[in-house]
Each structure stands twice: as structure tokens, then as C-alpha cells.
Image (cartoon, rainbow, N blue to C red):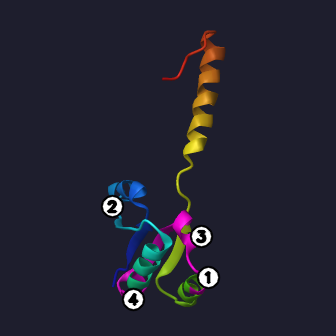
Amino acid sequence: MALKVKVVCRPTLAAGFELAGLAVTSATDASAAGDQLMRLAADPHVGMVLVDDGLYRLLPADLKARLDRQALPVVAPIPAPDWDARIAAEAYILEILRQAIGYRVRPR
């Protein structure tokens, strides 16, 4: 029997996981995420649940402990994108361009 990978994340991140072919359950807060995790933990066809790290950190400790005691599914928090890092990356690229062409390029 092949086990499935599921994702519990905020709606803003869901499209990326869906494009990767993963089944996504959206949750806007820790309460909704906890409810979805309990539902997925009871499904014998689910082998792994990837959880948005921001939601995972907000889950009650007793729920995390309960999920950790179960063999399946494996529940793994995954980091959300760091949008601030994008700004630093753009600044770095602009500086490289400035050095290469001798002219400061302005971002939009």
C-alpha cells in the first residue's frame, strides 16, 4: 500500500504545494491546523504530513506530543518562504550590476 503525503499550510502558500502535486489542506490559524492534523492522523492512507512551520509552532504542546507518539503519519514542520530575504537578494544583484556596468540600476 502506497502512503500519501499531505500538506497543512496557510492559504497563501497552498498554490505552490498544489503546483508541486501535493494535496493541500488550508488552515488560517493553529486551531484549524490542529483539527486538520487530527483528521489526517486518523487516515490510514497518510504517511507524512508537512505542516507550515508558523502554524506548527502555535499548536498546543500536548497535540504535538500526541502526534510525535504516533508512528504514522510522520508530521514534519517546513519553513515558510522568507520574503525579506528576497529584498536582500535583489540588493545584492543590483550591486553586482552596478559594479559590472558602472551604473546604478534602480528597482521598480
Give coordinates of residue 101: x percent, y percent.
60, 11
Q: For mark 2, what is the residue?
A: 21
Q: For mark 3, what is the residue?
A: 57
The secondary structure type at the circle numbered 2 is: loop
The residue shown at (52%, 90%) is 70
Specify the label residue 42 is tagged with: 4
Res 47 seen here:
no
The amino acid beneath tag 3 is Arg
| Of the image marks 2 and 4, the number of the one nearer the N terminus | 2
Task: Give whichever of 87, 27 is nearer the camera.
Answer: 27
Would you place residue 31 above or below residue 106 in this image?
A: below
Q: For mark 1, what is the residue?
A: 61
The secondary structure type at the circle numbered 4 is: loop
Q: Nearer the viewer, mark 3 or mark 2?
A: 3
Quadrant hosting residue 6? bottom left
Would you place residue 94 above or below residue 47 in this image?
A: above
The residue shown at (51%, 77%) is 75
Relative side of 34 to 98, left or right: left
Classed neighbour count for the residue bearing mark 1: other residues with Cα under 10 Å, few (<14), some (14–19), many (≥20): few
| Of the image marks 4 and 3, the number of the one nearer the N terminus | 4
